[in-house]
Amino acid sequence: MNRISSVLLCILPSLAFHVRAQDENGGRAIFSNGDQLSGTPGALTEDGLAWTAEHLLHQPSTIRLDSLLEVQLQAGDIPERNTTHQALLSLTNGDRIRGELVGLDDEYVTLKTWYGGELRINRLMATDLEVIRSEHALYSGPDSIENWTVSGEQGAWGVDNGQLQSRLKGSVAREIELPSRCHIHFDLAWRSNLKFHLILFSDEGDTSTPGNCYDLVCQRRFVYLRKKWKGKSSGTTNIGQPANIRELADQEKVGMDFYIDRATGTVAFYVDGRQAQVWSDEAPKVGSFGNWLHFVAEEYPLRISNIRASVWKGDLPENSETGAPDEPLKEEGQVIALQNNDTVVGEVGAIENGTLTITSKHGDIPIPVQRIRSVNIGSENFEEPIRKNGDIHGWLREGGRITFRLDSFRDGTMNGYSQAFGEAIFDLNAFSKLEFNIYNEDLDHLRGGSDW
């Protein structure tokens, strides 16, 4: 049986649907047997998902949902937002929703999103809330692989489940306009021995060996920083001393943070909140650097997620594992970390006009939302949303995932329901991929998710 015949077995011919084909909502259906079909998704009915494939099918047809693994979507336009901050809310089921924080009380966390309106999320189903000031945020992702430059072996990198994933040796790069002082964060996961490069301030995006750059080299637990430059005089030099990072030998996933002052040539390196090394370039003006950021896999697979680039004011954070907690942390209440590294403990109140009120033993404290860095909103009685037949995973182009029961799917929007936030209408342009049959464990190995 040829490939097209195999695909057609998963499709029921239907004349009952009229689907408006739109380039921005086009995509590719991936079936559980590995077959693929390009086209445009349409209405959702009891029989399945209407699908238009003009190059293959003479009329709109219906795809059985029990045969569908995922629908990959073409990139659509994302509107510009004039907001003071971006909030990232983590849920108990692994979802991560982003938007503007407009409400926080004993029952709900309310995020205003461009893709789903206001979402009132049950607070018992939320764990962590992080806030990034808009004027500080430079990049958050990863998003579609089309917005990255891949070099090396063909298909070396891709974006799946909101993560950059290496499949072969090679580099994936993106140009980000970074100021003199900046903060770069990402989560890195690997298997067995780590062999990985992070290239900073490269002047070339389409190679893993640019002429001008800082090159952070990870060889198992040993990490060192070297500088490369070319021009009238060219050279390579190691900066400072290498670091011996125990987490890179004992674990297979860490969070990495870099606090960089390009004017002074200082690079402070943190692993899981612990300061691992500080390097100082004695000649920071030597070299013609650019703004390319590269991730280079010498061994694979690697996974990189939660990439954030932001403005840094110059104050280094304290180590998360050192020092006794300050006296305020012994108070009862929630811990609210501020952008200036101060901490407030108390009960969060309402948000009005962009200001959150904290009730503490010192009285009510009004704090503008954009001054908040994070809020520990976890409860001792966590709940997870009830799993529903028809639940899907919607992966956001800007990073993050939303789980909901898909109720209707038409004209560039999706209607869905979750116990976490109720009913919502989502703009399809916000999503890079929709996963179906997500509770079928027999399909997990096909998704490139938690299993390597």
Image: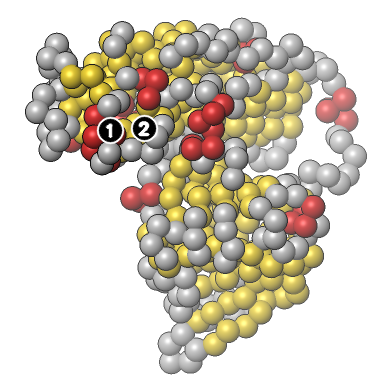
Q: Residue furthest right?
A: 324
Q: Residue at x 50, y 50 (%)?
A: 165
Where does residue 128 sit, x and y in percent of width and height? 64, 26
Q: Residues within 10 Å of mark 1 (few under 14, many from 20)?
A: some
Residue 378, quarter of picture: top right
What kind of element bears circle 2? strand
Q: Identify residue for label 1.
A: 7
Q: Mark 1 or mark 2, which is nearer to you?
A: 1
Let me know if residue 350 appears in the view.
no
Where does residue 344 sit, x and y in percent of width and height? 74, 27
Most foreground residue, 192 or 241:
192
Q: Quadrant of the C terminus?
A: top right
**Callout 2, which amino acid?**
Phe
Q: Residue at x 79, y 65 (%)?
A: 244
Q: Identify residue for label 2.
A: 31
Where does residue 20 sit, x and y in percent of width and height? 13, 23
Residue 205, quarter of picture: bottom left
Q: Residue at x 27, y 27 (%)?
A: 9
Q: Would you place residue 392 above or below residue 452 in this image?
A: above
Q: Residue furthest front?
A: 1
Q: Would residue 40 appear left or right of 294 to someone viewing this image?
A: left
Q: Residue at x 32, y 19 (%)?
A: 64
Q: Mark 1–mark 2 contact, CB under 8 Å?
A: yes
Most foreground residue, 447 or 144:
447
**Callout 1, which amino acid?**
Val
Q: Would residue 207 appear left or right of 130 to someone viewing this image?
A: left
Most foreground residue, 53 or 370:
53
